[in-house]
Amino acid sequence: MSALPASSSGRVGRVGRVGRVDGTPSRILDVAERLAQTLGFNGFSYADVASEIGITKAAMHYHYPGKADLGVALMERYQSSFCASLQHADATADGAPDKLVAYVRLYKDVLENRRMCLCGMLAAEYQTLPERIRATVDDFLATNERWLAKVLEEGRGAGSLAFRGDSNDMARILLSTLEGALLLSHLHGDLERFETVAEYLLVSLRPA
Amino acid sequence: MSALPASSSGRVGRVGRVGRVDGTPSRILDVAERLAQTLGFNGFSYADVASEIGITKAAMHYHYPGKADLGVALMERYQSSFCASLQHADATADGAPDKLVAYVRLYKDVLENRRMCLCGMLAAEYQTLPERIRATVDDFLATNERWLAKVLEEGRGAGSLAFRGDSNDMARILLSTLEGALLLSHLHGDLERFETVAEYLLVSLRPA
DNA sequence: GTCTATACAGCGATAGAC
DNA sequence: GTCTATCGCTGTATAGAC
Protein backbone atom coordinates (compact mmCIF):
# COMPACT_ATOMS: atom_id res chain seq x y z
CA MET A 1 0.00 0.00 0.00
CA SER A 2 1.52 3.22 -1.15
CA ALA A 3 0.27 6.56 0.06
CA LEU A 4 1.93 8.28 -2.85
CA PRO A 5 -0.18 11.26 -3.76
CA ALA A 6 -1.39 11.43 -7.30
CA SER A 7 0.47 8.44 -8.61
CA SER A 8 -0.39 7.63 -12.19
CA SER A 9 -0.51 3.93 -11.49
CA GLY A 10 -3.38 2.38 -9.67
CA ARG A 11 -5.51 5.48 -9.70
CA VAL A 12 -9.11 4.79 -8.82
CA GLY A 13 -11.42 6.68 -11.12
CA ARG A 14 -14.79 8.15 -10.32
CA VAL A 15 -17.12 5.23 -9.81
CA GLY A 16 -20.04 5.59 -12.20
CA ARG A 17 -23.16 3.46 -12.05
CA VAL A 18 -21.58 0.90 -14.33
CA GLY A 19 -18.36 1.00 -12.40
CA ARG A 20 -16.51 2.52 -15.31
CA VAL A 21 -12.98 3.70 -15.24
CA ASP A 22 -11.02 6.90 -15.75
CA GLY A 23 -11.92 9.18 -18.59
CA THR A 24 -9.81 11.44 -20.73
CA PRO A 25 -9.55 14.33 -18.22
CA SER A 26 -8.02 11.99 -15.68
CA ARG A 27 -5.58 10.53 -18.17
CA ILE A 28 -4.57 14.04 -19.17
CA LEU A 29 -3.88 14.89 -15.55
CA ASP A 30 -1.87 11.71 -15.05
CA VAL A 31 0.52 12.53 -17.88
CA ALA A 32 0.63 16.26 -17.22
CA GLU A 33 1.36 15.60 -13.58
CA ARG A 34 4.30 13.36 -14.31
CA LEU A 35 5.73 15.84 -16.79
CA ALA A 36 5.21 18.77 -14.42
CA GLN A 37 6.95 16.90 -11.62
CA THR A 38 9.94 16.05 -13.75
CA LEU A 39 10.27 18.95 -16.23
CA GLY A 40 8.33 21.68 -14.46
CA PHE A 41 5.03 23.29 -15.37
CA ASN A 42 6.73 25.39 -18.05
CA GLY A 43 8.74 22.38 -19.18
CA PHE A 44 5.98 20.55 -21.02
CA SER A 45 3.40 21.48 -23.64
CA TYR A 46 -0.11 20.49 -24.66
CA ALA A 47 1.51 18.66 -27.56
CA ASP A 48 3.64 16.55 -25.21
CA VAL A 49 0.64 15.40 -23.23
CA ALA A 50 -1.64 14.95 -26.22
CA SER A 51 0.78 12.81 -28.20
CA GLU A 52 1.46 10.58 -25.22
CA ILE A 53 -2.18 9.69 -24.66
CA GLY A 54 -3.03 9.60 -28.33
CA ILE A 55 -5.31 12.57 -28.81
CA THR A 56 -4.82 15.99 -30.38
CA LYS A 57 -4.03 19.29 -28.74
CA ALA A 58 -7.49 20.54 -29.65
CA ALA A 59 -9.09 17.73 -27.67
CA MET A 60 -7.08 18.76 -24.65
CA HIS A 61 -8.30 22.31 -24.94
CA TYR A 62 -11.84 20.97 -24.79
CA HIS A 63 -11.20 19.55 -21.31
CA TYR A 64 -8.80 22.25 -20.10
CA PRO A 65 -9.31 25.44 -22.13
CA GLY A 66 -6.10 27.10 -21.04
CA LYS A 67 -2.90 25.86 -19.49
CA ALA A 68 -3.75 27.73 -16.30
CA ASP A 69 -6.90 25.63 -16.01
CA LEU A 70 -4.82 22.51 -16.41
CA GLY A 71 -2.40 23.70 -13.77
CA VAL A 72 -5.13 24.46 -11.26
CA ALA A 73 -6.75 21.08 -11.84
CA LEU A 74 -3.36 19.46 -11.42
CA MET A 75 -2.71 21.07 -8.07
CA GLU A 76 -6.26 20.54 -6.82
CA ARG A 77 -6.10 16.83 -7.45
CA TYR A 78 -2.62 16.66 -5.97
CA GLN A 79 -3.80 18.47 -2.87
CA SER A 80 -6.84 16.21 -2.58
CA SER A 81 -4.76 13.10 -2.81
CA PHE A 82 -2.22 14.44 -0.35
CA CYS A 83 -4.87 15.39 2.18
CA ALA A 84 -6.37 11.94 1.90
CA SER A 85 -2.97 10.49 2.73
CA LEU A 86 -2.69 12.77 5.75
CA GLN A 87 -6.10 11.72 6.99
CA HIS A 88 -5.15 8.12 6.48
CA ALA A 89 -2.06 8.71 8.60
CA ASP A 90 -4.19 10.39 11.25
CA ALA A 91 -6.49 7.39 11.34
CA THR A 92 -3.95 4.58 11.32
CA ALA A 93 -0.67 5.87 12.72
CA ASP A 94 0.24 5.07 16.30
CA GLY A 95 1.14 8.41 17.83
CA ALA A 96 2.75 11.58 16.55
CA PRO A 97 6.20 10.13 15.71
CA ASP A 98 4.53 7.48 13.61
CA LYS A 99 2.55 10.16 11.79
CA LEU A 100 5.76 11.97 10.95
CA VAL A 101 7.25 8.77 9.61
CA ALA A 102 4.19 8.38 7.40
CA TYR A 103 4.59 11.98 6.26
CA VAL A 104 8.22 11.44 5.33
CA ARG A 105 7.15 8.30 3.54
CA LEU A 106 5.02 10.41 1.18
CA TYR A 107 8.09 12.31 0.05
CA LYS A 108 10.08 9.15 -0.30
CA ASP A 109 7.41 7.71 -2.59
CA VAL A 110 7.62 10.75 -4.82
CA LEU A 111 11.37 10.38 -5.05
CA GLU A 112 11.15 6.68 -5.79
CA ASN A 113 8.96 7.55 -8.75
CA ARG A 114 11.81 9.75 -9.96
CA ARG A 115 9.75 12.87 -9.44
CA MET A 116 10.03 16.14 -7.62
CA CYS A 117 7.21 17.27 -5.33
CA LEU A 118 4.72 19.07 -7.58
CA CYS A 119 4.37 21.87 -5.09
CA GLY A 120 8.12 22.27 -4.72
CA MET A 121 8.52 22.38 -8.48
CA LEU A 122 5.83 25.04 -8.82
CA ALA A 123 7.44 26.91 -5.96
CA ALA A 124 10.58 27.31 -8.03
CA GLU A 125 8.52 28.53 -11.00
CA TYR A 126 6.27 30.64 -8.80
CA GLN A 127 7.10 33.99 -10.39
CA THR A 128 6.12 32.75 -13.84
CA LEU A 129 2.79 31.23 -12.80
CA PRO A 130 -0.69 32.72 -13.25
CA GLU A 131 -2.17 34.00 -10.01
CA ARG A 132 -4.75 31.20 -9.85
CA ILE A 133 -2.03 28.58 -9.77
CA ARG A 134 0.01 30.49 -7.22
CA ALA A 135 -2.96 30.43 -4.90
CA THR A 136 -3.12 26.62 -5.03
CA VAL A 137 0.58 26.43 -4.19
CA ASP A 138 0.12 28.72 -1.22
CA ASP A 139 -2.83 26.66 -0.11
CA PHE A 140 -0.93 23.40 -0.34
CA LEU A 141 1.94 24.73 1.73
CA ALA A 142 -0.38 26.20 4.36
CA THR A 143 -2.26 22.92 4.64
CA ASN A 144 0.95 21.00 5.12
CA GLU A 145 2.20 23.37 7.76
CA ARG A 146 -1.08 23.24 9.65
CA TRP A 147 -1.10 19.46 9.69
CA LEU A 148 2.53 19.26 10.78
CA ALA A 149 2.06 21.86 13.52
CA LYS A 150 -0.93 19.94 14.84
CA VAL A 151 1.00 16.66 14.94
CA LEU A 152 4.02 18.33 16.54
CA GLU A 153 1.86 19.92 19.22
CA GLU A 154 0.10 16.64 19.86
CA GLY A 155 3.41 14.79 20.16
CA ARG A 156 4.96 17.30 22.50
CA GLY A 157 1.84 17.21 24.67
CA ALA A 158 2.04 13.42 24.87
CA GLY A 159 5.78 13.48 25.50
CA SER A 160 6.53 11.45 22.39
CA LEU A 161 8.20 14.40 20.64
CA ALA A 162 10.59 17.01 21.97
CA PHE A 163 11.61 20.33 20.47
CA ARG A 164 12.13 23.92 21.43
CA GLY A 165 10.02 26.85 20.32
CA ASP A 166 6.76 27.26 18.50
CA SER A 167 5.24 24.26 16.76
CA ASN A 168 4.39 26.40 13.72
CA ASP A 169 8.06 27.30 13.39
CA MET A 170 9.06 23.68 13.69
CA ALA A 171 6.49 22.75 11.07
CA ARG A 172 8.15 25.18 8.68
CA ILE A 173 11.54 23.74 9.49
CA LEU A 174 10.35 20.23 8.69
CA LEU A 175 8.67 21.29 5.46
CA SER A 176 11.66 23.33 4.26
CA THR A 177 14.09 20.56 5.03
CA LEU A 178 12.08 17.84 3.33
CA GLU A 179 11.41 19.94 0.23
CA GLY A 180 15.07 20.89 0.03
CA ALA A 181 16.22 17.32 0.50
CA LEU A 182 13.79 16.20 -2.17
CA LEU A 183 14.97 18.91 -4.56
CA LEU A 184 18.63 17.93 -4.27
CA SER A 185 18.08 14.19 -4.02
CA HIS A 186 15.90 14.27 -7.11
CA LEU A 187 18.81 15.48 -9.24
CA HIS A 188 20.40 12.08 -9.44
CA GLY A 189 17.57 10.03 -7.97
CA ASP A 190 19.66 9.64 -4.83
CA LEU A 191 17.28 7.99 -2.38
CA GLU A 192 20.01 7.44 0.16
CA ARG A 193 20.74 11.13 0.30
CA PHE A 194 17.12 11.88 1.09
CA GLU A 195 16.97 9.26 3.79
CA THR A 196 20.04 10.65 5.51
CA VAL A 197 18.35 14.01 5.89
CA ALA A 198 14.94 12.60 6.82
CA GLU A 199 16.41 10.29 9.43
CA TYR A 200 18.33 13.12 11.05
CA LEU A 201 15.16 15.17 11.16
CA LEU A 202 13.14 12.45 12.88
CA VAL A 203 15.89 11.59 15.33
CA SER A 204 16.31 15.21 16.35
CA LEU A 205 12.67 15.27 17.44
CA ARG A 206 13.00 12.26 19.74
CA PRO A 207 12.70 12.98 23.46
CA ALA A 208 15.98 12.64 25.36
CA MET B 1 30.05 44.80 2.93
CA SER B 2 27.93 42.15 1.34
CA ALA B 3 29.27 38.78 0.41
CA LEU B 4 26.37 38.21 -1.92
CA PRO B 5 27.60 36.13 -4.80
CA ALA B 6 27.11 37.58 -8.23
CA SER B 7 25.14 40.62 -7.20
CA SER B 8 24.40 42.94 -10.08
CA SER B 9 25.10 46.01 -8.01
CA GLY B 10 28.62 47.02 -7.16
CA ARG B 11 30.23 44.48 -9.40
CA VAL B 12 33.88 45.14 -9.95
CA GLY B 13 34.82 44.65 -13.56
CA ARG B 14 38.06 43.43 -14.97
CA VAL B 15 40.57 46.18 -14.37
CA GLY B 16 42.13 47.15 -17.68
CA ARG B 17 45.17 49.42 -18.04
CA VAL B 18 42.92 52.47 -18.14
CA GLY B 19 40.88 51.21 -15.21
CA ARG B 20 37.86 50.71 -17.42
CA VAL B 21 34.60 49.17 -16.32
CA ASP B 22 32.41 46.22 -17.19
CA GLY B 23 31.79 45.37 -20.79
CA THR B 24 28.77 43.95 -22.53
CA PRO B 25 29.37 40.29 -21.60
CA SER B 26 29.33 41.20 -17.94
CA ARG B 27 26.18 43.28 -18.27
CA ILE B 28 24.51 40.42 -20.11
CA LEU B 29 25.39 38.09 -17.27
CA ASP B 30 24.11 40.54 -14.68
CA VAL B 31 20.67 40.74 -16.24
CA ALA B 32 20.49 37.08 -17.21
CA GLU B 33 21.48 36.08 -13.72
CA ARG B 34 18.77 38.13 -12.10
CA LEU B 35 16.16 36.75 -14.49
CA ALA B 36 17.38 33.18 -14.04
CA GLN B 37 17.22 33.52 -10.27
CA THR B 38 13.69 34.86 -10.32
CA LEU B 39 12.04 33.25 -13.37
CA GLY B 40 14.26 30.24 -13.93
CA PHE B 41 16.67 29.50 -16.76
CA ASN B 42 13.77 28.56 -19.03
CA GLY B 43 11.78 31.54 -17.83
CA PHE B 44 13.64 34.23 -19.72
CA SER B 45 14.73 34.73 -23.32
CA TYR B 46 17.53 36.38 -25.24
CA ALA B 47 15.02 39.09 -26.13
CA ASP B 48 14.32 39.82 -22.43
CA VAL B 49 17.98 40.33 -21.66
CA ALA B 50 18.77 42.21 -24.85
CA SER B 51 15.94 44.71 -24.52
CA GLU B 52 16.83 45.44 -20.92
CA ILE B 53 20.42 46.39 -21.66
CA GLY B 54 19.60 48.07 -24.95
CA ILE B 55 21.16 45.79 -27.53
CA THR B 56 19.70 43.28 -29.99
CA LYS B 57 19.41 39.52 -29.72
CA ALA B 58 22.00 39.17 -32.47
CA ALA B 59 24.54 41.04 -30.39
CA MET B 60 23.95 38.66 -27.53
CA HIS B 61 24.59 35.69 -29.78
CA TYR B 62 27.95 37.22 -30.61
CA HIS B 63 29.02 37.00 -26.96
CA TYR B 64 27.14 33.81 -26.08
CA PRO B 65 26.42 31.82 -29.26
CA GLY B 66 23.85 29.54 -27.70
CA LYS B 67 21.75 29.69 -24.58
CA ALA B 68 23.69 26.77 -23.14
CA ASP B 69 26.86 28.87 -23.40
CA LEU B 70 25.12 31.65 -21.53
CA GLY B 71 23.97 29.22 -18.85
CA VAL B 72 27.42 27.77 -18.36
CA ALA B 73 28.96 31.25 -18.13
CA LEU B 74 26.27 32.18 -15.63
CA MET B 75 27.00 29.28 -13.35
CA GLU B 76 30.77 29.61 -13.68
CA ARG B 77 30.71 33.21 -12.59
CA TYR B 78 28.26 32.38 -9.81
CA GLN B 79 30.48 29.58 -8.60
CA SER B 80 33.56 31.80 -8.74
CA SER B 81 31.91 34.51 -6.73
CA PHE B 82 30.57 32.01 -4.23
CA CYS B 83 33.95 30.38 -3.77
CA ALA B 84 35.51 33.78 -3.22
CA SER B 85 32.99 34.38 -0.46
CA LEU B 86 33.81 31.03 1.11
CA GLN B 87 37.52 31.82 1.04
CA HIS B 88 36.80 35.18 2.56
CA ALA B 89 34.91 33.46 5.36
CA ASP B 90 37.80 31.05 5.85
CA ALA B 91 40.20 33.96 6.17
CA THR B 92 38.21 36.25 8.42
CA ALA B 93 35.76 34.17 10.43
CA ASP B 94 36.60 33.29 14.01
CA GLY B 95 36.13 29.56 14.26
CA ALA B 96 33.81 27.06 12.60
CA PRO B 97 30.52 28.36 14.04
CA ASP B 98 31.34 31.81 12.72
CA LYS B 99 32.05 30.35 9.30
CA LEU B 100 28.64 28.73 9.26
CA VAL B 101 27.05 32.03 10.18
CA ALA B 102 28.84 33.62 7.23
CA TYR B 103 27.63 30.79 5.02
CA VAL B 104 24.04 31.29 6.07
CA ARG B 105 24.51 34.99 5.49
CA LEU B 106 25.18 34.28 1.80
CA TYR B 107 21.76 32.71 1.46
CA LYS B 108 20.13 35.53 3.36
CA ASP B 109 21.66 38.05 0.96
CA VAL B 110 20.20 36.20 -2.00
CA LEU B 111 16.78 36.25 -0.38
CA GLU B 112 17.02 39.94 0.46
CA ASN B 113 17.60 40.59 -3.23
CA ARG B 114 14.29 38.82 -3.88
CA ARG B 115 16.06 35.99 -5.63
CA MET B 116 16.29 32.24 -5.41
CA CYS B 117 19.70 30.57 -5.29
CA LEU B 118 20.77 30.12 -8.91
CA CYS B 119 21.88 26.59 -8.23
CA GLY B 120 18.64 25.71 -6.48
CA MET B 121 16.64 27.12 -9.35
CA LEU B 122 18.63 25.13 -11.90
CA ALA B 123 18.24 22.08 -9.69
CA ALA B 124 14.48 22.28 -10.15
CA GLU B 125 14.93 22.62 -13.92
CA TYR B 126 17.69 20.03 -14.02
CA GLN B 127 15.91 17.57 -16.31
CA THR B 128 15.42 20.21 -18.99
CA LEU B 129 18.99 21.50 -18.97
CA PRO B 130 21.79 20.69 -21.47
CA GLU B 131 24.37 18.34 -20.05
CA ARG B 132 27.04 21.06 -19.87
CA ILE B 133 24.89 23.13 -17.55
CA ARG B 134 23.99 20.14 -15.41
CA ALA B 135 27.66 19.54 -14.82
CA THR B 136 28.13 23.03 -13.41
CA VAL B 137 25.19 22.49 -11.05
CA ASP B 138 26.68 19.23 -9.85
CA ASP B 139 30.00 20.93 -9.38
CA PHE B 140 28.52 23.78 -7.39
CA LEU B 141 26.74 21.42 -5.04
CA ALA B 142 29.80 19.24 -4.56
CA THR B 143 31.95 22.28 -3.80
CA ASN B 144 29.48 23.50 -1.21
CA GLU B 145 29.28 20.11 0.45
CA ARG B 146 33.04 19.78 0.58
CA TRP B 147 33.46 23.19 2.17
CA LEU B 148 30.71 22.54 4.70
CA ALA B 149 32.07 19.11 5.61
CA LYS B 150 35.51 20.59 6.17
CA VAL B 151 34.14 23.31 8.43
CA LEU B 152 32.00 20.84 10.33
CA GLU B 153 34.93 18.51 10.87
CA GLU B 154 37.11 21.37 11.98
CA GLY B 155 34.47 22.59 14.43
CA ARG B 156 33.88 19.20 15.92
CA GLY B 157 37.62 18.69 16.34
CA ALA B 158 37.90 22.01 18.16
CA GLY B 159 34.84 21.30 20.27
CA SER B 160 33.01 24.35 18.95
CA LEU B 161 30.45 22.25 17.06
CA ALA B 162 28.64 19.10 18.08
CA PHE B 163 26.72 16.61 15.95
CA ARG B 164 26.33 12.91 15.44
CA GLY B 165 27.42 10.96 12.42
CA ASP B 166 29.52 11.66 9.38
CA SER B 167 30.41 15.25 8.58
CA ASN B 168 29.63 14.67 4.90
CA ASP B 169 26.12 13.62 5.84
CA MET B 170 25.72 16.66 8.05
CA ALA B 171 26.95 18.87 5.20
CA ARG B 172 24.19 17.49 3.01
CA ILE B 173 21.65 18.12 5.73
CA LEU B 174 22.72 21.74 6.04
CA LEU B 175 22.70 22.29 2.30
CA SER B 176 19.31 20.64 1.81
CA THR B 177 17.74 22.59 4.62
CA LEU B 178 19.07 25.95 3.50
CA GLU B 179 18.10 25.40 -0.12
CA GLY B 180 14.63 24.26 0.91
CA ALA B 181 14.18 27.18 3.27
CA LEU B 182 15.30 29.56 0.54
CA LEU B 183 12.92 27.98 -1.97
CA LEU B 184 9.88 28.38 0.25
CA SER B 185 10.85 31.72 1.79
CA HIS B 186 11.45 33.14 -1.66
CA LEU B 187 7.80 32.65 -2.60
CA HIS B 188 6.62 35.65 -0.65
CA GLY B 189 10.00 37.17 0.15
CA ASP B 190 9.55 36.01 3.71
CA LEU B 191 12.91 36.71 5.32
CA GLU B 192 11.64 35.87 8.78
CA ARG B 193 10.68 32.41 7.65
CA PHE B 194 14.18 31.76 6.40
CA GLU B 195 15.76 33.04 9.59
CA THR B 196 13.62 30.74 11.72
CA VAL B 197 14.97 27.71 9.89
CA ALA B 198 18.56 28.95 9.72
CA GLU B 199 18.62 29.81 13.41
CA TYR B 200 17.34 26.38 14.35
CA LEU B 201 20.01 24.81 12.22
CA LEU B 202 22.84 26.75 13.83
CA VAL B 203 21.54 26.23 17.36
CA SER B 204 21.24 22.49 16.84
CA LEU B 205 24.96 22.35 16.09
CA ARG B 206 26.01 24.08 19.32
CA PRO B 207 27.82 21.91 21.85
CA ALA B 208 25.72 21.08 24.94
C1' DG C 1 -15.67 14.51 -27.62
C1' DT C 2 -12.44 14.41 -31.08
C1' DC C 3 -10.70 15.76 -35.38
C1' DT C 4 -8.17 18.94 -39.23
C1' DA C 5 -6.57 23.16 -40.10
C1' DT C 6 -4.90 27.36 -38.90
C1' DA C 7 -3.79 31.73 -36.57
C1' DC C 8 -0.41 34.20 -34.09
C1' DA C 9 3.22 35.14 -30.89
C1' DG C 10 7.50 33.88 -29.11
C1' DC C 11 11.65 31.28 -29.14
C1' DG C 12 16.74 30.34 -30.37
C1' DA C 13 19.60 31.03 -34.03
C1' DT C 14 21.96 32.72 -38.52
C1' DA C 15 23.42 35.75 -42.63
C1' DG C 16 25.29 39.67 -44.05
C1' DA C 17 25.76 44.85 -43.96
C1' DC C 18 28.04 48.47 -41.37
C1' DG D 1 30.72 44.68 -31.87
C1' DT D 2 26.30 45.81 -33.20
C1' DC D 3 22.78 46.21 -36.44
C1' DT D 4 18.51 44.68 -39.68
C1' DA D 5 16.24 41.06 -41.48
C1' DT D 6 14.75 36.64 -41.54
C1' DC D 7 14.44 31.62 -40.92
C1' DG D 8 12.39 27.42 -38.79
C1' DC D 9 10.35 25.69 -34.99
C1' DT D 10 7.35 25.35 -31.08
C1' DG D 11 4.12 27.36 -27.94
C1' DT D 12 -0.96 28.30 -26.69
C1' DA D 13 -5.19 28.85 -28.52
C1' DT D 14 -9.38 28.92 -31.80
C1' DA D 15 -12.79 27.78 -35.74
C1' DG D 16 -15.49 24.68 -37.65
C1' DA D 17 -16.42 19.89 -39.54
C1' DC D 18 -17.69 15.26 -37.98
Image (spheres, coloured by chain):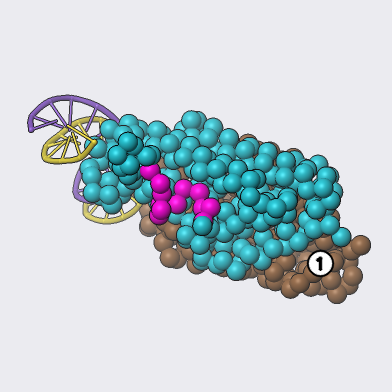
Chain colours: A brown, B cyan, C purple, D yellow
Q: Amino acid at mark 1?
A: Phe
In front here: A78 or B143? B143
User: Can residue B178 be seen at all in this image of the molecule?
Assistant: no
User: Can residue B155 be seen at all in this image of the molecule?
Assistant: yes
Q: Is residue B171 left or right of residue B71?
A: right
Q: Residue at x 81, y 67 (%)?
A: A163
Q: 10 Å neighbourhood of mark 1: few (<14), some, or many (≥20)? A: some
Residue A52 x, y percent position in the rendering: 47, 39
Q: In which quadrant is the C terminus of chain B drawn?
A: bottom right
Chain letter for mark 1, please.
Answer: A
Q: Residue at x 48, y 37 (%)?
A: B76
Q: Main secondary structure of the magenta part?
A: loop
| Quadrant of the rendered image containing residue A103 | bottom right
Above or below for A114 versus C1: above
Residue A170 x, y percent position in the rendering: 72, 66
- The magenta stretch spans which residues? B2-13
Q: Is residue A72 left or right of residue B191?
A: left
Is residue A187 found inside the magenta-colored segment of the image? Answer: no
Q: Secondary structure at mark 1?
A: loop
Above or below for B150 versus A198: above
Residue A137 x, y percent position in the rendering: 54, 62
To which residue does mark 1 refer?
Answer: A163
In front here: B139 or B187? B139
Q: Residue at x 41, y 34 (%)?
A: B68
Is residue B6 found inside the magenta-colored segment of the image? Answer: yes
Q: Residue at x 63, y 45 (%)?
A: B91
Residue A91 x, y percent position in the rendering: 80, 66
